[in-house]
Amino acid sequence: MTWTLMDKCCNRCWHSPEYPCRHYIRCRLSGPLCHEDVECRVRRSRRLKEIRYGRHGFKINVPLASCTIAAGAHEVYEAVVKEVKSRGILADIHRTGCMGMCYIDPWIELSKKGMPSAIYANVKPSDVPRIIKEYLEGDVSSAFALRNRTGNAKGEDKVPLLDELEPWRNQVRWVSRNCGIVDPESIEEYIALGGYRGLDRALNMRPEEVIEEIRKSGLRGRGGAGFPTWLKWKIAREQPGDVKYIIMNADEGDPGAFMNRLLAESDPHRVLEGMIIAAYAIGASKGFIFVRAEKPLMAERLSKAVEQARKYGLLGDNILGRGFSFDVEVILSAGAFVCGEETALIAAIEGRTRPRQRPPYPATRGLWGKPTIINNVETLAHVATIMAEGWEKFAKYGTEKTKGTKMFCVTGSVKRTGAYEVPVGTTIEKLVVEIAGGPPEGRKIKAVQIGGPSGGCVPASLLSTPIDYETLQKAGAIMGSGGIVVIDDHSCMVDVAKFFTSFTVAESCGKCFPCRIGMKILYDILEKITNGEGSEEDLEVLEELGNVIRSSSLCALGGTAPNPVLSTLRYFKDEYLAHVRSKRCPAKVCTKLVEYWINPDKCTGCGTCARNCPSKAISGELGKPHVIDKSKCIHCGQCYIVCPVGAVEKR
Amino acid sequence: MVKVYVNDKEVEVGEGSYIIDAVIKAGYSVPTLCFFKGIYREASCRICIVELGNGRLVPACAYPVSEGLRVYTNTERVRRNRRVILELILASHKIKCQSCPRKGGFCQLLDLAREYGVEGIPVCAECPLHGNECLLVRGEPCLGPITIAGCGSPCTREGTICIGCRGPITRRDVLVEAARLYKEHKIPLEEVFSKMKLFWNNHPSLDKIYNILLETYNGGEKK
Amino acid sequence: MVNQTVVNVVSSIVARYRGERRYLMRMLQEIQSRYGYLPRRALEELAKLTGIPLSEVLNVATFYHQFKLEPPGYYIILVCMGTACHLKGNLDNYEAMKRFLGLGKYENTAKDGTVSVEKARCFGACSLAPVVMVISRDGKERYLHGHVTIRDARRIVAKYRSLALKKIKGGGS
């Protein structure tokens, strides 16, 4: 075992979880503090350099988060290991988290002393030998981007700097600063990059002062509702009794939002640090991390972080000698979207199901009847960063009412899908068009769906809306956890509303009537409309029913579930009317309203469509144009998909 | 003690009480279905919603009182929401009152539907409460199965058929059930249709009703 | 004999968590990881040993998505139902797969027990949408297919079905 920064430099250092040293964190980077020894000092700075540049001056970063693994990063990692071995070079192959730019997954980053740090995009295992060979020969011309320029390598001027790239330049990497840089399974690297400084600072303050600091920063919960974090903490702190709990909500369930997963997988210690600070502020002695079992890597990394923190005395009794004790238990959630609702989450930890009526709010009566604070992953990561950097730097960003930055996951019809961090108040247009690159060629943005199944659709005409809690609410959407799905003119808004409604119908816990039955009826009506059986009366029913569900449901899931329907009704009424009046789907998505025909000029008569047709509606001789029998056609769209020459057309 | 205003009337209730206690103490009432004091306070049915001073709708049975809380039990919004919720409950309720064990007893759902003018419950639901013999059994084209309840079935009590003066029910499942009843008792639909013309001749959904009845009547067990 | 082992498995799990109510979800997860689903017999045993009413155990077991009450196929084909995948037509893929296997509306597992087709939550691989993930029952194998079309969907089902048939026969597991 090599010596790490976390270990004792010599026998004069006495820190251990049982006898913690107050200056342990500060001592790691600028130590030793309690004694003067050149050797100890050199040892530390040498190790720091090793972490930053690799032991042998050559470092290869391979991102291993679930998104990059899905894109093939494991295979790339193995290819890199094999190549390094077969070449016999000395290099550190370093696992990192995800940078958030999904469209270049899997990427690798090569950095060698004297050479610019180069990022290669969309790497296949077979590319790895060529990339390493070129890089070692001093040629970076095939790289995707460079972190810095040195002027030593060939082709440097042809490759843009990362900071010059649109998706990078416009971001403010505040909580995601370490993502893609730090090894998520190493507490040492996190500390080398300034980690746990925030905790150290917080423990030097009184809990009230910590709450005050968060108040000044203006941080609001990043989970959806945007409740001021400090206020929640203050309420819990002022509750009588000494048993209080804190829960980290890592049970991300929104389709199209994955920033919490990304943060917890790429920089788990930051999140954990935020949790310890929050526990100190409210006086909790026990915490729970509630993480989805379906996201095993996230659970594994968080558990590992907890283990490491415990090993070095950052969790447990008398943390850093400040007389504050706190421990964390990781709980695997079996998964239900309604667990995003605080009371349902508490029920899940207690081994029950379903939310309950609020008030009493969890901050006064939560887990097992004790005051409980629930913060989501991103909020806690913000807490850690604010405590380390000071509230001024955080409050510099954002709008009057909402300070700081927020991560957004942009998916759907954009060129550059990914998770981007921008200041609150950035316009939708900037995020979707400048950063994420807008829709593919030839497509037009029709709407932007913000906030997942609880959010709403904002039409293209309102793209200049700044993203913050209040303005989005006015526009009929919510910020939610920050999932943004870009919808282009090839999608039907009624179909989109139907999709989100089907999601909430499936996820409704079934406790209260408006949500359980109301959402089902909303869905049935939408299905009727997309099948061409709707009437204008139905649109009125949609609106009235939606409003009732919104105002009288038990929990926030039901209270926001009709949003996709109501917002599309508000902005895209003409599309609904086209469905009910002229029985036509303008985007040609609702298959029942689309007529399929075979263009005889294009048809080669291969017969694929006829073989795939489930209702035997297609006839024709081999080699001659085929014909669809309209009376038999069931509008399933199979022929449209299987036709190799695109001769089946919709009209 | 906590001071609460129910429909602007001041009333004092003990700390830890719920809105419903204050409402009752003030002499008003809210309808409840799922609430049973001391046994079930989960606010599932949402029928007891009331409006707060700030415009929020909350269930009276499970919302704790606080000093100076303003509660309105009977605003336009509350009534509309209650009506829609009732309709939702009825939408998933098999209205087979003829075979309900509560036949002859009291039915909260029926009472509420009557009170809030929710269509969906047929006269047939009330009729047996008065111990009447079903006229369909006698083979008469009674409109009871497809007419909105709430009248207290005075006609059938007098032994004459229901002629649908309160208007038709347009809910598909009720109509399907009605068509089955007609078929079971071998009552020709033409007779029923001719009775329907008396009051419903200009009703906008008349064609729809015809179609559903015919479809089920002729189609046997088809949906 | 088989039931005896179920009793042993459940009682050792219950003993590890001292039968506490708050670990109900955890205990169910362990039972599921042992059998691949929650056998009725095991749930009854759990209820008996912990004193939690069976209805409550079933309440939790049916409420959360992770728990399955019926044995899944050898391979589980997870069709992502995230927003991006939906917009790019994954529902059609799902339906094509079910049609290919001849499954009814509420059936998810092929009659021969080779493959199951299930809707799943977003995998976070939105840039590859529409995505289909295939995992084996024991969780050891994991494959991802991106940019799936209806034709691919059928091919995927056929491929894993024949693979599973081979494994079931060969491995005898």
Image (cartoon, coloured by chain):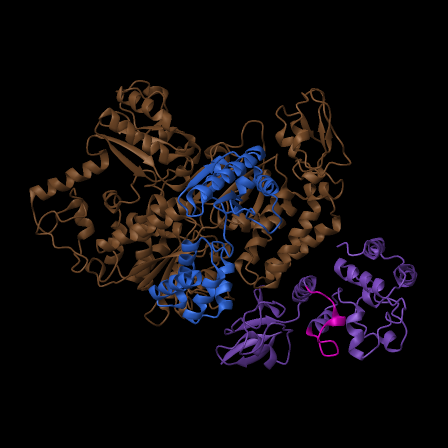
Task: Identify the residue at horizontal 87%, vertical 74% (top origin).
Answer: B155
Tell me if I can see residue A521 in this picture. yes
Q: Nearer the viewer, residue A627 or A424?
A: A627
Colour displayed for chain A in the image of the structure: brown
**Vertical order, C102 against A617 (above or below):** below
Give x and y (percent) for residue A432.
Answer: 50, 36
Q: Position of residue B197 (x, y in %)?
A: 91, 60
Chain appearing in blue on the rendered image: C
**Magenta: main secondary structure:** loop
Q: Is residue A175 visible?
A: no
Q: Is C101 a magenta residue?
A: no
Q: Horizontally, is C40 left or right of B215 in the view? A: left
Range shown magenta: B93-108
Where the N terminus of chain A falls, by quadrant?
top left
Q: Which chain did the image draw in purple?
A: B
Question: At x 42% / y 69%, what residue is drawn?
Answer: A365
- Front residue of C80/A562: it is C80
- Closer-to-camera residue (B14/A336): A336
Place of residue A409 in the rendered image (x, y in percent of width and height, measured from the top left): 46, 42
Q: Is residue A648 above or below residue A590?
A: above
Quick check: B196 left or right of A179?
right
